[in-house]
Amino acid sequence: MSQIKIKCEKCDHEFVVDVEYEHVDSNSDRGMGDEKIYEAVVDVECPICGEHITGTIEYWEYPEGVVDHKSDDNLDGASVVEYGIECGLN
């Protein structure tokens, strides 16, 4: 389990959400080992205004142990302020 901090697009409130990242894909065509893609599903309501926030967030690991890219492009109603607060994904 990880925690992310998101910002509601409706009221700008920032709050922490628990998420579970799952390994969803790998690309072995890279020179320094596998590139791994992790995804977490978000489905919450803003505790202040009730805005429904839903979608997925992703991060890419390449080489192993190094976060190469992060995305909240598929998240509706909020944006990610901090990824993986306790696991160093920021």
Image (tube, rainbow, N blue to C red):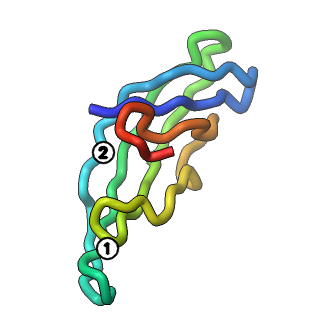
Crowding around mark 2 (Cα neighbors within 10 Å: few <14, some 14 to 19, many 20+) is: some
Q: Quadrant of the N terminus?
A: top left
Label disc, if present, on residue 21 of the rendered structure: 2
Q: Nearer the viewer, residue 7 or 87?
A: 87
Q: Amino acid at mark 1?
A: Glu
Residue drawn at (57%, 11%) of the image: 47
Say if mark 2 contacts mark 1, CB within 8 Å: no
Rendering coords of residue 56 (x, y %): 45, 47
Q: Quadrant of residue 7?
A: top right
Between label 2 and label 1, give the one nearer the viewer: 1
Camera-side residue: 43 or 63? 63
User: Would you place residue 50 above or below residue 23 in this image?
Assistant: above
Query: Which residue does the image show at 50% across and 56% down from the upper left?
Result: 70
Tell me the element at label 1.
Answer: strand
Task: Name the kind of residue labelled 2 in the image.
Answer: Tyr
Q: Which residue is mark 1?
A: 35
Identify the image quadrant of residue 25.
bottom left
Judged from this view, the residue extending furthest toward the top is 48
- Residue 34 coordinates in the image, percent (x, y): 25, 76
